[in-house]
Image (tube, grey):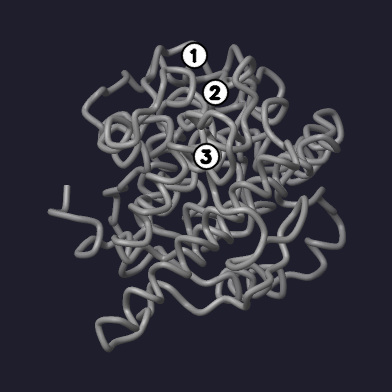
Amino acid sequence: MAANFWESTQRRYWQFTKEELAAMRQKLEDEDPNLVQMYPLPQLRHINIYLNQQFNRLAKRLGVRQQALATAQVYLKRFYTRVEIRRTNPYLLVATALYLACKMEECPQHIRLIVQEARGLWPETFHGQDTSKLGECEFFLISEMSSQLIVHQPYRTLTQLQGEFNLTPEESQAAWQAINDHYMTDLPLLYPPHIIGLTAILLALTCYNRQNAAGGPNGAGSSGGLVMAANALAHAQAQSQARAAAMGGNSGPGTPNLTPQGSFPGGSFSSQGGRELGEGTSPPDPRVAKMQRFTKWLAESNIDIEGMIDCTQEIISFYDCHEQYDDFAVRDNIKRFIKARGLDK
């Protein structure tokens, strides 16, 4: 693995802006508008949810560890920035990405076992595939990714900092779940892994119900938690800017200026006014104390706080979108273009 993320191919070639990502996808669709019109698909988030489920089903059968599963999902995201999904058999790509990721993460699976389990999972859309087809798809996948296969994951940030912020087992599990969930969004292609990891910790400290910390979408969404998260980020940015001003500099590219009042799902936040975190005469809430420590750490570390705000909004928005997910509709639409174009043979 590259010494660090900042020197990696992931940062140099596979981190985009939202505008760049949208332009790449639009370009792929514009290459064959008739194909797009003939086989309409649900929104991308719902497709991502469905593909994530297929990854998890196959990985469970094979006993694949989380690191390899996460790498496989990033491979598929990268691939589909280069190739339009309607030109492929997504089930074959899921199996191939997992096969390749297992090799890269040093937990290899035999190609015959991958094919066997995939046929058992997807008999209607994978029955015509064999080891040679998966081998060919592997070379295709590697080629489209320009052989840039090293992936830095947010899990490392979480494991390194959970002691720093005194996370409970429930909070660590909630943060881990948030990282798992972010692979169903575009965030792996938009932000560095440490920003994702810190956002997951923030969500674990604020938005997750402690009794359902591992509940994924059902465990998040408290409006009070969202306001607390927004306040924490706003305070951290204000402190960072004040610190930079005191040193005679500025907040730098990592901490763009925010207006005193900012829009945020679930409410507004203010870097000034209102109660400070932990203010009051009642006994201190341990969660508030953790948030104060987290906020202070962010302010002193020159982290991209605006990036964290965007990540938080994206994950919460994804959870809202998840509630409208229709598994049958997505599966049926994917099956339709696979069968019609003979991609299952």
What's the amino acid at mark 1?
Answer: Lys
The residue at which mark 1 appears reads as 60
The residue at which mark 3 appears reads as 93
Please report whichever mark, 2 or 3, sits nearer to the chain's N-terminal start.
2
Label 2 near label 1: C-beta < 8 Å? Answer: yes
| Rendered-image quadrant of the C terminus | top right
What's the amino acid at mark 2?
Answer: Asn
Q: Residue 199 appears at what percent x and percent y? A: 48, 47
Q: Residue 166 appears at what percent x and percent y? A: 34, 29
Question: What is the distance, in whole Å, between disc 3 and disc 1 at their CAs?
Answer: 17 Å
Q: Is residue 148 left or right of residue 193?
A: left
Residue at the outermost left position: 3
Question: What is the distance, in whole Å, between disc 2 and disc 3 at their CAs?
Answer: 14 Å
Give the structural element (helix, strand or loop) at label 2: helix
The residue at which mark 2 appears reads as 56
Q: What residue sits 33% from the left and 32% below the top?
A: 162
What's the amino acid at mark 3?
Answer: Leu
